[in-house]
Amino acid sequence: MSNQVVTRTIKASIDNPSQVRDDLDSHGFAASKLWNVGRWTIQRVWDAIGHIPDADELCSYLKYHDRYADLHSQSSQRVLQELGEAFTSWYEQDDPDANPPGYRKHGDEHPRSTVTWKNQGFKLDTQYDRVRLSKGTNMKESRYAADYILCEYTPQTDRTLADAESVQTVRAVWNGQRWELHFVCKMRVDSPETPGEKTAGIDLGICNTAAVSLGDETLLYPGNALKEDAHYFRHEEYDTEGENGPSQKAQWARRKKSRRQDHFLHALSKDIVAQCVQHGVGTIAVGHPKEIRADTDWGRHGNKRLHDWAFETLLSHIEYKAEERGIDVERVDEAGLKTSKTCCQCGTVADSNRVERGLYVCEECGLVANSDLNGAENMRATVTPNPGEDRSNGCLAQPSVRLFDTSTGRVAPQEQVVP
């Protein structure tokens, strides 16, 4: 087996909470205050010149602000980067009903925000499971006060930080009851043998989250559970929006929706990779619609759905899970390929072949297929030039449907899912 370096997040509980909680609380509150200062600055610049400052501009504006010095400089930079990313995400929605990122405030109090320390802001002692987190200048109360927060920790997994090649960042995260530490590491792991020499093609979509062609079998993963969550929590969020920004319930709805979506994508990618291993797949070709949001105006609702489409997240989940099983993943740029209009059997390109949503009928060779699976087979053809030779008849028209079961949180064949 060969070795490979991967990025992993190791969660750890804090063993001396009574000694560090006050310091972590003050830093978590300070991160919220800095977010609010950045939010106010964006609004002021936006109102004055019609421009939304990005993260770099925010850091330049606020570098000498008193709130910036509450945290270590790299920690303050990360707070403003998150704010800039939030505004970019909101702006790209192009949805008049969506509100811009709000202030972090619960009544007159600030919530505990996640605080991130980069490589210059922490010092790790893996021998004794301790980490020193640098305080901001304003948090050093006097010359006799410690310049750092000393946290003793216990990893919540079998892997320890001593196994890591390097630790890139440390995050202090408030989980609603207590603080915990998240270490983002580079780790060297054994790469397993490739399951086989077959290839698979994956077409990502909105209605069907993924369509997979394995050669002798095809799989369809509908996105019904994801769409139902998006609809429900969006209404919960809009109905509880406060006059001065998101209410506590609106913020809860956003977090809940995000967690459920993340779990769905993890379960889906895990099942896709497991099916590839079972079928002896060594290479996966995944369509990457990276330019789709910039291609054209899809209308108000279409643009909203495209913005909510987390194809990059799903793609990254598939990549690292496949990597752990010894499977190579190739991103195929869909721009110019016309995979949805091209017959995977004879290569004919025609808009009219898509008879209706979900149905592809080639007038040239008579192929009848699910349109998403036709696209997945075209993806597979980018790796296997003549994929038709190992494809069983009818599998493109009659795929195996695998559904996400909300009661178990797992993906299973359609007939095994309890309504």
Image (cartoon, helix red, strand yellow):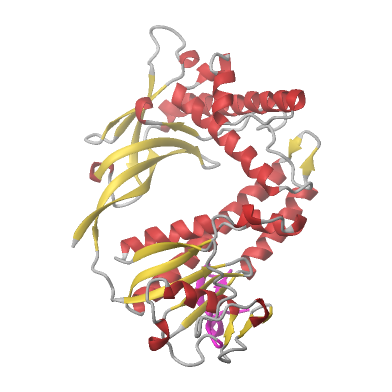
Image height of 347 relative to 315, above or below: below
Residue projecting furthest to the left: 1
Q: Position of residue 213 (x, y in %)?
A: 46, 78
Image height of 293 relative to 410, above or below: above
Visible residue check, residue 160: yes
Residue lying at 68% horizontally and 65% vertically, measured from the top left: 228
**Side (left or right) of 278 relative to 81:** left
Is 310 one of the magenta-colored residues?
A: no
Visible residue check, residue 72: no
Is 417 one of the magenta-colored residues?
A: yes
Residue closest to the eye, 38 or 377: 377
Residue closest to the eye, 170 or 380: 380
Q: Position of residue 78 (x, y in %)?
A: 50, 31
**Side (left or right) of 373 relative to 320:** right
User: In the rendered structure, which segment of residues is drawn in magenta?
Assistant: 397-419
Residue lying at 71% horizontally and 39% vertically, measured from the top left: 100
Image quadrant of residue 362? bottom right
Quadrant location of the C terminus in the rendered image: bottom right
